């Protein structure tokens, strides 16, 4: 196929500014919302466990000292600077565990240290040389999670009911104390604070307290603490019963392992995760299909949606949609238990576009075979009657349109899907675009753009697997000693694994 010779979109005016859009297909909205419910206490940006304890302690000190908002904020910033410096100092110690995350603001503070001791007023200030841009430092990314775990109160900057000042202050107290009075700080100044390093939470007292927070309260059914506790126990069971090296291994356990159904104490959370993880297969398949399609577009040049669809169709077999669908491996056995169809050699061995389409069809088959009620269905597409369950590109939608197309050509079906994706991305761009006040420019988050019937690529696209927040949960568990990892990279129970018993 040839590209039509057009150089980029010819904007009529220069007042529009295309920027790199995120989530161009908008196919992960349900998944993200459901993940937030089922993986409380962490997000994709909460990377370092001991900050939960540190923020609680600063809130406690701010209250004890009766600080107003501005003074509390300054104490938080000064404390985060001292804390990061203490961690950087420990990095020089042979006992430091390099597999643990870096402290926040490390790069800027390292740059400052290259010029000599850190000037606290400058580093913790709000102007040039500051360790963090956001006024409240790194509290922002953690605050919601810290409130969920009741470490912070849900209103104002104050400790929450689960915060234990006595335990946390024992090891992190000296960090706050130094933060209150320090003027110039070198790595030597903070050498004595090595016990506060991020790498020491798996053996520290505040780490034990944090481990209890992340272990949740599995028995308090109906609370977020219970959901967190059940989710962490699901992970603990996966790594004790099977070989888990990565998130894919964990996903396979959750989707296919009989224990997810067999363990009576799990309540509904594990089974909801099964539905969610199965849905993530479809979400990732759409993202990969979209990315593969965008890759077909030349960097400079344009194609019609039909030409683009033909590029997808070219790599697919010449058969009907029904024949293609019927040749896929079964998704359940005779008893209705899930089979690893998505991992079947006949599916995994295909080229990307073919594999994505097969995975989407398997998602449609899951939609047809999951019990109409129950936790798996809830995780897979949400409660019945909600638009999420039937929206465009959902498994329900794929099941419906592939029925309509059953006796027609698979290749024509691919061209149809390409058109749907392009139109959907276009609508989303229009919906997400906004007028930027300062310069009056119209900002458009895009990757490709549809203009006058032609599709033009503005930015590269890269497909990332959807986040179920299992990575942060594993990391928090590992940092606080609930989980551990062998030198070969296999996950195991950690020294505090019994908290998940
Ligand atoms: Zn360390």
Image (spheres, rainbow, N blue to C red):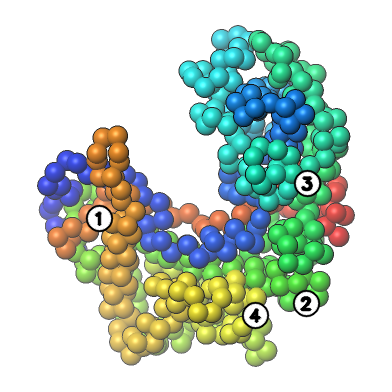
Q: For the residues marked 3 and 4, what is the alpha-carbon distance in whole angstroms?
A: 34 Å
| Residue in view at x 80 percent, y 64 percent | 220
Label 4, residues with CA under 10 Å away: few <14, some 14-19, many ≥20: some
Quarter occupied by the C terminus: bottom right
Mark number for residue 262? Answer: 2
Mark number for residue 449? Answer: 1
Mark number for residue 161? Answer: 3
Residue closer to the observer: 94 or 36: 36
Task: Reply above or below: 426 against 436.
Answer: below
Task: Reply above or below: 142 against 377.
Answer: above
Q: Is residue 161 toward the left or the right of residue 28 in the image?
A: right
Q: For the residues marked 4 and 1, what is the alpha-carbon distance in whole angstroms?
A: 40 Å
Q: Which residue is mark 4?
A: 374
Question: Which of disc 2 and disc 3 is earlier in sequence?
Answer: 3
Query: Which one is in front in this view, the residue at disc 2 or the one at disc 4?
Result: 4
Question: Which of disc 4 and disc 2 is earlier in sequence?
Answer: 2
Residue 480 visible in image = no
Q: Is mark 1 within 8 Å of ligand 1?
A: no
Q: Is mark 3 within 8 Å of ligand 1?
A: no
Q: For the residues marked 3 and 1, what is the alpha-carbon distance in whole angstroms?
A: 50 Å
Question: Which of disc 1 and disc 4 is earlier in sequence?
Answer: 4
Secondary element at tag 1: strand
């Amino acid at each position: 196929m040839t590209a039509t010779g057009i150089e980029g979109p010819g904007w009529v005016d220069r007042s529009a500014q295309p920027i790199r859009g995120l989530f161009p297909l908008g196919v992960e909205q349900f998944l993200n919302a459901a993940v937030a419910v089922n993986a409380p206490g962490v997000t994709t940006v909460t990377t370092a466990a001991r900050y939960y304890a540190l923020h609680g302690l600063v809130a406690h000190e701010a209250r004890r000292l009766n600080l107003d908002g501005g003074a509390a904020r300054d104490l938080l910033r000064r404390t985060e600077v001292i804390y990061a410096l203490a961690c950087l100092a420990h990095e020089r110690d042979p006992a430091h565990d390099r597999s643990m995350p870096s402290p926040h603001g490390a790069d800027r503070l390292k740059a400052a240290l290259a010029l000599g001791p850190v000037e606290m007023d400058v580093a913790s200030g709000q102007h040039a040389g500051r360790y963090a841009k956001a006024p409240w430092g790194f509290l922002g990314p953690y605050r919601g999670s810290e409130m969920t775990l009741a470490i912070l109160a849900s209103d104002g900057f104050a400790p929450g009911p689960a915060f234990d000042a006595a335990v946390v202050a024992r090891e992190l107290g000296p960090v706050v104390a130094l933060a209150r009075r320090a003027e110039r700080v070198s790595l030597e100044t903070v050498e004595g604070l090595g016990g506060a390093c991020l790498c020491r939470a798996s053996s520290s007292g505040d780490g034990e307290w944090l481990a209890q927070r992340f272990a949740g309260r599995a028995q308090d059914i109906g609370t977020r603490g219970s959901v967190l506790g059940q989710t962490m126990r699901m992970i603990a069971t996966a790594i004790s019963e099977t070989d888990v090296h990565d998130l894919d291994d964990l996903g396979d356990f959750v989707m296919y392992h009989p224990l997810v159904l067999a363990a009576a104490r799990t309540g509904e959370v594990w089974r909801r995760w099964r539905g969610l993880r199965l849905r993530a297969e479809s979400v990732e398949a759409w993202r990969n299909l979209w990315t593969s399609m965008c890759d077909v577009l030349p960097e400079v040049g344009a194609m019609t949606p039909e030409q683009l669809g033909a590029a997808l169709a070219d790599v697919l077999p010449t058969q009907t949609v029904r024949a293609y669908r019927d040749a896929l491996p079964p998704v359940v056995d005779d008893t209705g238990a899930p089979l690893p169809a998505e991992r079947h050699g006949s599916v995994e061995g295909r080229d990307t576009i073919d594999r994505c389409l097969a995975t989407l069809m398997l998602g449609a088959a899951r939609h047809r075979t999951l019990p109409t009620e129950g936790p798996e269905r809830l995780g897979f597409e949400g409660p019945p009657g909600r638009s999420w369950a039937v929206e465009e590109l959902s498994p329900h939608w794929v099941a419906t349109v592939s029925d309509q197309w059953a006796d027609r050509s698979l290749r024509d079906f691919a061209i149809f899907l390409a058109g749907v994706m392009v139109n959907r991305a276009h609508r989303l761009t229009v919906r997400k675009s906004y007028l930027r006040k300062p310069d009056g420019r119209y900002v458009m988050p895009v990757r490709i753009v549809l203009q006058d019937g032609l599709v033009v690529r503005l930015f590269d696209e890269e497909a990332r697997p959807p986040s179920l927040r299992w990575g942060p949960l594993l990391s928090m568990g590992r940092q606080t000693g609930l989980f551990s990892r062998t030198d070969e990279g296999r996950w195991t129970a950690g020294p505090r694994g019994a908290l998940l018993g």
